[in-house]
């Protein structure tokens, strides 16, 4: 297994170091600049545009973030680039724009967002971009159909399972994905501890990062049960438990 110590070396800013969408909105170059300034790793989300370009945006539906009706997969990259996030000067960046902007200054954890029937080529396009990227980067997904393509279309890039739940069906589904070259896990802190996380950490020595940490109690829980956290709404370096 490749050395993934960089993945857990610093807290990971959830969708960048936004300010809960007051002035610096999630998944924007402004939020990424703030994370870089404080040397936090960055988590971001990627959807696929109508013309097959990976776009850094969380929701597949555009309304909450841009005020525009419709879906990311219905619009071209150029059309999305002309939109504004939350009425700010920021637009939804392409993944290439983000990579060029970050330029290896902090690690990236990129979550691929599947939309059944509208995400063909997402893994392949992200894999192509990261193949030539010089910085530290990992990919992950909730969506098992995407994760199954990681080793084929993004070989050599650390791949993670994003997961939640603690019931038997959830846990068994997560175990089934360990056959697909998973090298880390991003797990919902509210559903920890559980036997899947215990197994991947204890038996497989696989790093686990938590989501989403929003207060100091959650910081303490994270470091008792996992290697690192994905956080928002506060600055971990100013929290007493870090």
Image (tube, rainbow, N blue to C red):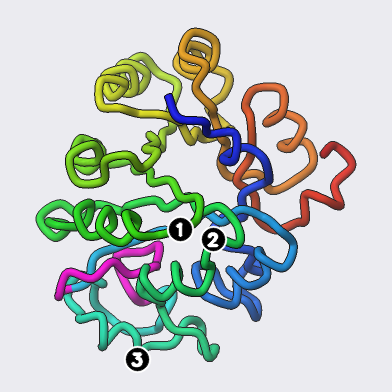
**Residue 138, placed above or below residue 189:** below
For the residues labelled 3 and 2, the Cα–Cα distance comes to 26 Å
Q: Secondary structure at mark 1?
A: loop
Q: Is residue 59 magenta?
A: yes
Question: Is there CB contact under 8 Å for labels 2 and 1?
Answer: yes
Residue at which label 1 appears: 134
Q: Categorize mark 1 by other alpha carbons within 10 Å: few (<14), some (14-19), many (20+).
A: few
Q: Main secondary structure of the magenta part?
A: loop
Foreground mark, 3 or 1, reads 1
Q: Secondary structure at mark 3?
A: loop
Residue at which label 2 appears: 104
Residue at x 53% of width, y 76% of height: 29
Task: Place residue 76 in its image quadrant.
Answer: bottom left
Residue at x 52% of width, y 31% of height: 3
Q: Left or right: where does residue 24 sit relative to residue 143?
A: right
For the residues labelled 3 and 1, the Cα–Cα distance comes to 28 Å
Residue at which label 3 appears: 82
């Amino acid at each position: 297994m490749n050395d993934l110590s960089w993945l857990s070396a610093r807290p990971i800013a959830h969708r960048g170091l936004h300010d809960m969408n007051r002035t610096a909105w999630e998944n924007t170059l402004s939020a990424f600049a703030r994370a870089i300034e404080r040397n936090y790793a960055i988590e971001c989300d990627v959807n696929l545009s109508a013309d097959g370009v990976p776009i850094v945006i969380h929701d597949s539906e555009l309304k909450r973030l841009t005020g525009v009706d419709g879906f990311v997969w219905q619009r071209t990259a150029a059309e999305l680039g002309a939109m504004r996030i939350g009425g700010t000067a920021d637009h939804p960046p392409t993944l290439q724009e983000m990579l060029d902007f970050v330029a290896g200054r902090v690690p990236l954890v990129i979550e691929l967002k599947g939309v059944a029937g509208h995400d063909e080529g997402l893994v392949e396009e992200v894999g192509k971009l990261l193949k030539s990227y010089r910085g530290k980067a990992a990919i992950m997904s909730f969506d098992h159909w995407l994760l199954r393509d990681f080793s084929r279309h993004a070989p050599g890039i650390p791949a993670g399972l994003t997961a939640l739940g603690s019931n038997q069906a959830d846990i068994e589904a997560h175990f089934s994905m360990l056959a697909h070259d998973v090298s880390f896990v991003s797990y919902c802190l509210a559903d920890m501890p559980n036997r899947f996380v215990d197994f991947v950490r204890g038996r497989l020595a696989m790093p686990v990062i938590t989501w989403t940490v929003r207060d100091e109690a959650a910081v303490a829980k994270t470091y008792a049960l996992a290697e690192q956290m994905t956080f928002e709404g506060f600055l971990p370096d100013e929290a007493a438990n870090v």
